[in-house]
Image: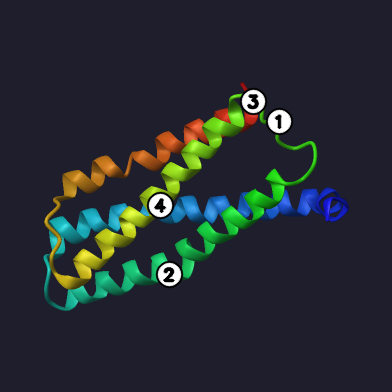
């Protein structure tokens, strides 16, 4: 199995980067949809239904598959001999940030269900502030992987 992972490394790494980009796009966009949904749309009517549809499709068709593929290809990289050296801080800081990203993804999923049920109690400001979290986590991940401190 390790020979396969070594031979497939450039392909797996490429697919991991593509998956991360798709996931990050969704993590940036869904909270922005929530801002407009909370501030401009309300919790009933045609526009509310349209926003619920957009939010569902973004989460289920783009974000969920991108998160899963990010994890699958990322774990394949972790198990590729010579890629991760656990004696350094960087794999641990990256892992913590990826877990934070995953938590945020699921937090967004719960908020989407609240909008769908018409029970959202958060305002646009909350979603604007939460929209900064993936940026901070992305900074930790990129510096961890590139600088390898």
Residue count near mark 4 (Cα–Cα under 10 Å), binned few <14, some 14–19, many ≥20: many
Element under label 2?
helix
> Circles 1 and 4: CB distance less than 8 Å?
no
Q: CA distance from mark 1 to mark 4?
A: 29 Å
Q: CA distance from mark 4 to mark 3?
A: 25 Å
Side of 115 where 74 appears, left or right: right
Residue count near mark 1 (Cα–Cα under 10 Å), binned few <14, some 14–19, many ≥20: few
Residue 103 is situated, as x and y percent measured from the top left of the image, at 39, 49
Which residue does the numbered mark 2 point to in the structure image?
60
Comparing marks 4 and 3, which lies closer to the viewer? 3
Q: CA distance from mark 4 to mark 2?
A: 12 Å
Q: CA distance from mark 3 to mark 1?
A: 10 Å
Which residue does the numbered mark 1 point to in the structure image?
85
Which of the marked residues, 3 or 2, is nearer the chain's N terminus?
Answer: 2
Element under label 4?
helix
Q: Name the residue rendered at 41%, 34% in the picture.
A: 136
* Rendered view: 50 above or below 77: below
Which residue does the numbered mark 4 point to in the structure image?
27
């Amino acid at each position: 199995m390790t020979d396969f992972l070594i031979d497939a490394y450039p392909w797996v790494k490429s697919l991991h980067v593509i998956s991360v980009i798709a996931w990050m796009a969704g993590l940036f966009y869904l909270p922005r949809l929530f801002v407009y949904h909370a501030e401009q749309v309300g919790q009933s009517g045609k526009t509310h239904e349209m926003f619920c549809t957009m939010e569902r499709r973004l989460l289920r068709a783009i974000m969920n598959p991108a998160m899963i593929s990010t994890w699958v290809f990322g774990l394949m990289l972790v198990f590729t001999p010579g890629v991760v050296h656990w004696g350094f801080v960087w794999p641990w800081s990256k892992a913590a940030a990826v877990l934070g990203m995953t938590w945020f993804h699921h937090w967004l999923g719960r908020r989407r269900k609240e909008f769908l049920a018409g029970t959202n109690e958060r305002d646009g400001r909350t979603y604007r502030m939460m929209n900064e979290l993936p940026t901070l986590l992305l900074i930790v991940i990129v510096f961890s992987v590139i600088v390898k401190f």
